[in-house]
Image (cartoon, rainbow, N blue to C red):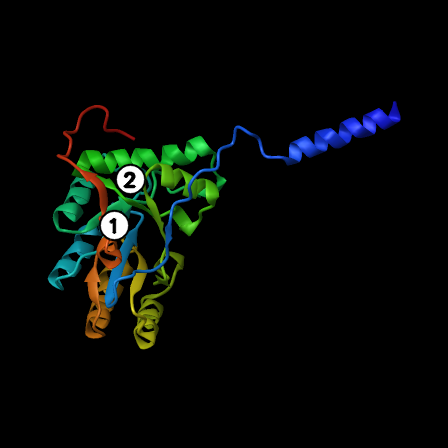
């Protein structure tokens, strides 16, 4: 009897250690950490749309440059609010790239499979409704991802985007520290730059950004969208934008 119990326990332990035959091996999305087109710099802006978006766009356009906005759906404010819709449209209509930063800025590595998809599709739908463009790129909040996040992104036809330079604005870096970080970057002069900034930080937008644009362009970099710095298409599809109705809500 004791021997049989030991055998049964051993078999149960072995069975638990084996992967379930119902779990399929899914493709992992590509993770982008740097640009690939020499001489390009992609300035990216997270956590919007927010009130400083217009100033980000104007600073870039005045320098004959473009940027990339990784938008949330319901972070600082609901993306379906009229003011937020105007901001998203403004960025898109002025030649900037719009991309997904997920719906509510949750750490995706702490979410279930269904919740990961929910966080992704809701902001994708909002961007498609507002601009007509379905994003090809997603930046996970906090830069955190795991295989489950990569699998969900692959199913959704998207690539994950991180960065190779952080201005430090989201963690409290002063303007002086941010400018010094850009100075150090230019001194190293890498072939390409994929920079993380936040459109929600006022001093970053109004003081650091003009300095960064000047320093990068003076160093010979072309300031382009993420897609341009990769030589890829920014969207999976583009169609006519939608018309706001009762379904546009957070």
- Judged left or right of residue 15, residue 137 is left
Q: Secondary structure at mark 1?
A: strand
Q: Which mark is residue 77?
A: 2
Residue positioned most to the bottom: 187
Q: Do tag 2 and tag 1 residues touch (Cβ < 8 Å)?
A: no
Q: Position of residue 37 (x, y in %)?
A: 25, 62
Check the image and report above or below for 127 versus 219. above
Examine the image and state in which quarter residue 62 appears.
bottom left
Q: Secondary structure at mark 2?
A: loop
Nearer-the-camera pick, 180 or 223: 223
* Number of disc labels: 2
Q: Position of residue 125 (x, y in %)?
A: 26, 33
Check the image and report above or below for 41 versus 226. below
Q: Residue at x 27, y 44 (%)?
A: 136
Q: Position of residue 187 (x, y in %)?
A: 32, 77
Q: Position of residue 72 (x, y in %)?
A: 31, 42
Could you tell me which quadrant the C terminus lies in?
A: top left
- Judged left or right of residue 34, residue 15 is right
Q: Which mark is residue 207?
A: none
Q: Residues within 10 Å of mark 2 (few under 14, many from 20)?
A: some
Q: Residues within 10 Å of mark 1 (few under 14, many from 20)?
A: many
Nearer-the-camera pick, 183 or 174: 183
Examine the image and state in which quarter residue 193 appears.
bottom left
Mark 2 against mark 1, which lies toward the viewer? 1
Q: Residue at x 73, y 30 (%)?
A: 11
Q: Name which of mark 2 and mark 1 comes first in the sequence.
A: 1
Check the image and report above or below for 138 versus 212. above
- Judged left or right of residue 158, residue 57 is left
Is there any visible trace of residue 117 in the rendered image? Answer: yes
As measured in the structure, the alpha-carbon distance from the residue carrying label 2 to the one carrying label 1 is 15 Å
The residue singled out by tag 1 in the image is 69
Is there any visible trace of residue 82 in the rendered image? Answer: no
């Amino acid at each position: 009897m004791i021997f049989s119990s030991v055998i049964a326990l051993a078999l149960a332990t072995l069975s638990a250690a084996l992967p379930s035959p119902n779990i399929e091996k899914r493709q992992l999305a590509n993770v982008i950490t740097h640009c690939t087109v020499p001489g390009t710099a992609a300035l990216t802006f997270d956590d919007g749309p927010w009130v400083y978006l217009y100033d980000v766009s104007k600073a870039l356009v005045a320098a004959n440059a473009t940027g990339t906005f990784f938008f949330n759906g319901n972070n600082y404010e609901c993306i379906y609010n009229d003011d937020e819709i105007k901001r998203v449209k403004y960025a898109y209509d002025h030649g900037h790239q719009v991309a997904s930063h997920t719906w509510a800025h949750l750490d995706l590595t702490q979410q279930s499979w269904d919740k990961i998809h929910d966080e992704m599709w809701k902001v994708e739908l909002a961007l498609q409704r507002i601009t007509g463009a379905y994003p090809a790129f997603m930046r996970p909040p906090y830069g955190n991802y795991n295989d489950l996040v990569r699998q969900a992104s692959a199913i959704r036809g998207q690539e994950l985007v991180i960065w190779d330079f952080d201005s430090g604005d989201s963690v409290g870096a002063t303007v002086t520290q941010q400018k010094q970080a850009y100075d150090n970057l230019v001194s190293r002069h890498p072939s390409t730059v994929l920079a993380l900034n936040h459109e929600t930080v006022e001093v970053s937008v109004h003081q650091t950004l003009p300095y960064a644009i000047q320093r990068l362009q003076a160093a010979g970099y072309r300031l382009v969208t993420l897609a341009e710095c990769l030589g890829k298409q920014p969207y999976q599809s583009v169609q006519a934008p939608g018309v706001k109705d009762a379904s546009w809500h957070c």
